[in-house]
Amino acid sequence: MQRLAVALAYVHSCGVLHRDLKPDNVLLRGEEPLLTDFGLALDAEDTERLSQTGGVLGTPGYWSPEQALGKKHEQTVATDVYGLGALLYACLTGEPPVRGNGSLMAYLTPEQFTGCPPPRALFPEVPEWLSALCMRCLAFDPRDRPPSAEAVARALALGPAGI
């Protein structure tokens, strides 16, 4: 996850938002993660240009609240930080952080994003600091998330001292 966060920080430094972080878009070459599928990528400075006019973009279960709620002007680096948290959550629990009841509409309600149990509540062997970092990335309000993918990479590299 730390290497993936570094790769995403590089993508952001190039002025690009990925907007579709999920397990299917990460390939492994040995222990090296490769971030793939930039089909929903967006120029971070040009939030007017979307892949689809007025469409909801991303993958249910992994998309950020601002994506699910169609708030295109609020999609920033914080959107991808949420995606990193969703990937981390899936790595720690085997499940996406948000699970609907089988209908797309179930993924479109704000309540879906606030009831996610911390990974440590499901698996006590998950270190407290890692569970806390994951939940910070998954904060409903983008302002409550770590400020960048680089900050997430640094926290993962430092372990308990990084929180």
Image (cartoon, grey):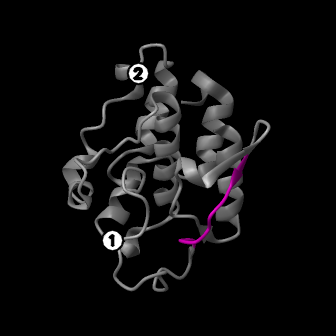
Task: Name the residue beneath numbered marker 2.
Answer: 120
Q: Is residue 16 magenta?
A: no
User: Callout 1: few (<14), some (14-19), or many (20+) C-alpha neighbours within 10 Å?
Assistant: few
At horizontal 60% and vertical 50% (from top left) the residue drawn is 149
- The part of the chain drawn in magenta is 33-41
Mark carried by residue 156: none
At horizontal 65% and vertical 71% (from top left) the residue drawn is 15
**Residue furthest right in the image:** 30
At horizontal 36% and vertical 29% (from top left) the residue drawn is 118
Q: Position of residue 137 (x, y in %)?
A: 45, 44
At horizontal 26% and vertical 48% (from top left) the residue drawn is 100
Disc 1 marks which amino acid?
Lys
**Residue furthest top in the image:** 125
User: For residue 52, which quarter of the picture?
Assistant: bottom left
Q: Position of residue 97 (x, y in %)?
A: 37, 41
Task: Name the residue beneath numbered marker 1.
Answer: 71
